[in-house]
Image (cartoon, rainbow, N blue to C red):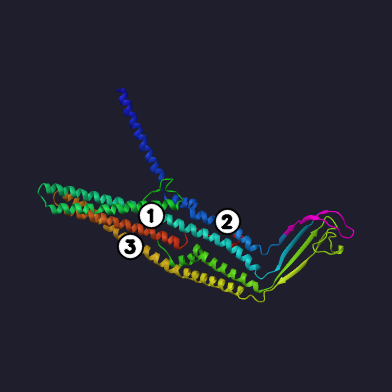
């Protein structure tokens, strides 16, 4: 008996430990919106790729700046000299040190190249900012979708449970001869119709969790998918479209990026056009000869041999006179790219006021709809409670109970949808006004 009691106690302990572990695991997987955004910012693969692009932009800037930097070349030719010439005999080894320092003195494309290198870094910075905004917004929408579909599934299951109770009541009344088979069949069909809607909400909920995991940089094959914590709530929001439009035109990352593309295309065009102007280059070649009596290549007398170290300076300029369309064609191509970027930028600037007006109308509409459905839900709940009490006392029919319960749950589902749409509109407002992130407009910080 003691052994049996000990075994039972041991089984209870293991069961309790398993339940406790499952509870803690569930709590550990639960995650708030703040944690979602923070994890997305740190681990999202698209954001990480954009950060790498920012590091590569420093190397590209050096390429553009290299036009203004001096070039230095060093060489050490070495060999063996053999043969006989007047007054010479034997074999000599030799080595000659050579160096050339070249500096561009004038190039019409030099200022444009320096500016283009700076713009390259600014473009990479804004591409990172755009990636941050897009991924944070996607994670937020996935979080809201998971909360909404989880609550919707719960409401549908509650509705199905109450309809199933009505089926049981109708079956009892049919067996007692108080109703016909039609009422039972109608109640059964209505309860079974919810299976598809419940399954659809559950699948959408799982898909939202998957999208949330991908946005957070979590591999679904190696780790459990995050479980969103909390429920959807609606927060009243008053917006000033005019002031927010002016602010959005200054701080939106995608608009800043479009403007930078216009600047970059303009500098590219100027760099190409610089080939029409003369370029002046100065050079300072020098040779160090540790021995004497070594013939230069092609020399025919001793006066042409190496007699010591020497330094020579010179300057040269080039000027393209006829390009056969090479430069002109490249200029036309760069100008076309600049004009396309300008059109895209203006289109984006023009679209921002319309977009903010639309979102502001959505916020107002969903708020009004939410208030209306909240009042309807309260009235439907009171009516369902009264019919339920009358049903217990025989003053209401099961049909009335089923109708009032369905109306109450459908109204509650509509209220949930209105809250969900309001949260989506708030997220869109934050994206459209550039509130996800604060961006620096100081170009000197990138230099």
Report if the CB atoms under discs 3 and 1 are less than 8 Å apart: no
Give me the disc on residue 368.
3
From which residue to which does the magenta span run? 73-93
Quarter holding the C terminus? bottom right
* Residue 208 percent coordinates (x, y): 38, 53
| Picture residue at 72% right of the left edge, 71% below the top | 317
Residue 63, compared with residue 219, is above or below; it is below
- Label 1 CA crowd tier, 10 Å (few <14, some 14–19, many 20+): many
Give me the disc on residue 410.
none
Question: Hey, which residue is sitting farthest front in the picture?
Answer: 84
- Label 3 CA crowd tier, 10 Å (few <14, some 14–19, many 20+): few
Tell which tag, 3 or 2, sits nearer the viewer: 2
Q: Is residue 255 visible?
A: yes
* Residue 394 percent coordinates (x, y): 13, 49
Q: Secondary structure at mark 2?
A: helix
Give the residue pinned by disc 1. Answer: 144
Give the residue pinned by disc 2. Answer: 55
Residue 395, compared with residue 316, is above or below; it is above
* Residue 114 percent coordinates (x, y): 63, 65
Quarter holding the N terminus? top left
Q: Of 242 and 261, which appears nearest the observer?
A: 261
| Picture residue at 37% right of the left edge, 66% below the top | 361
Tell which tag, 3 or 1, sits nearer the viewer: 1
Q: Of 379 and 425, which appears nearest the observer?
A: 425
């Amino acid at each position: 008996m003691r052994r049996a009691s000990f075994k039972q106690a041991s089984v209870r302990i293991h069961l309790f430990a398993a339940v406790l572990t499952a509870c803690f695991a569930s709590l550990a997987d639960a995650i708030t919106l703040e944690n979602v955004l923070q994890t997305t910012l740190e681990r999202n693969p698209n954001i990480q790729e954009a950060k790498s692009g920012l590091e590569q932009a420093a190397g590209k800037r050096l390429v553009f700046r290299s036009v203004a930097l001096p070039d230095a070349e060093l060489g050490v030719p070495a060999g063996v000299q053999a043969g006989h010439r007047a007054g010479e005999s034997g074999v000599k080894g030799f080595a000659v040190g050579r160096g050339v320092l070249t500096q561009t003195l004038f190039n019409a494309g030099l200022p444009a190249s320096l500016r283009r290198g700076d713009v390259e870094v600014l473009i990479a910075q804004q591409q990172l900012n755009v990636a941050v905004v897009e991924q944070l917004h996607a994670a937020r929408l996935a979080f809201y979708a998971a909360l909404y579909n989880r609550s919707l599934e719960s409401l549908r299951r509650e509705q199905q449970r109450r309809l199933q109770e009505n089926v049981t009541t109708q079956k009892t009344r049919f067996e007692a001869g108080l109703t016909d088979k039609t009422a039972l069949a109608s109640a059964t069909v209505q309860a079974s119709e919810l299976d598809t809607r419940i399954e659809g909400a559950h699948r959408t909920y799982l898909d939202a969790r998957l999208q949330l995991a991908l946005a957070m940089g979590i591999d679904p094959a190696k780790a459990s998918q995050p479980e969103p914590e909390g429920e959807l709530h609606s927060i009243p929001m008053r917006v000033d479209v005019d002031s927010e439009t002016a602010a959005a035109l200054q701080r939106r990352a995608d608009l800043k990026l479009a403007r930078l593309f216009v600047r970059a295309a303009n500098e590219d065009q100027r760099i190409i056009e610089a080939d029409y102007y003369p370029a002046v280059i100065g050079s300072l070649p020098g040779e160090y000869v540790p021995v004497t009596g070594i013939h230069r290549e092609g020399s025919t007398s001793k006066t042409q041999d190496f007699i010591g170290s020497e330094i020579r300076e010179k300057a040269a300029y080039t000027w393209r006179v006829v390009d056969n369309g090479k430069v002109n064609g490249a200029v036309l191509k760069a100008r076309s790219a600049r004009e396309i970027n300008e059109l895209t930028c203006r289109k984006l600037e023009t679209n921002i006021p319309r977009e903010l007006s639309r979102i502001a109308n959505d916020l107002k509409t969903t708020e009004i709809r939410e208030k209306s459905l909240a009042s309807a839900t309260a009235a439907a709940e009171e009516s369902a409670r009264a019919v339920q009490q009358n049903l217990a006392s025989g003053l209401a029919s099961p049909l009335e109970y089923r109708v009032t319960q369905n109306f109450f749950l459908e109204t509650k589902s509509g209220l949930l949808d209105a809250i969900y749409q309001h949260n989506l509109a708030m997220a869109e407002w934050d994206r459209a006004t550039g509130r996800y992130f604060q961006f620096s407009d100081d170009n000197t910080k990138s230099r």
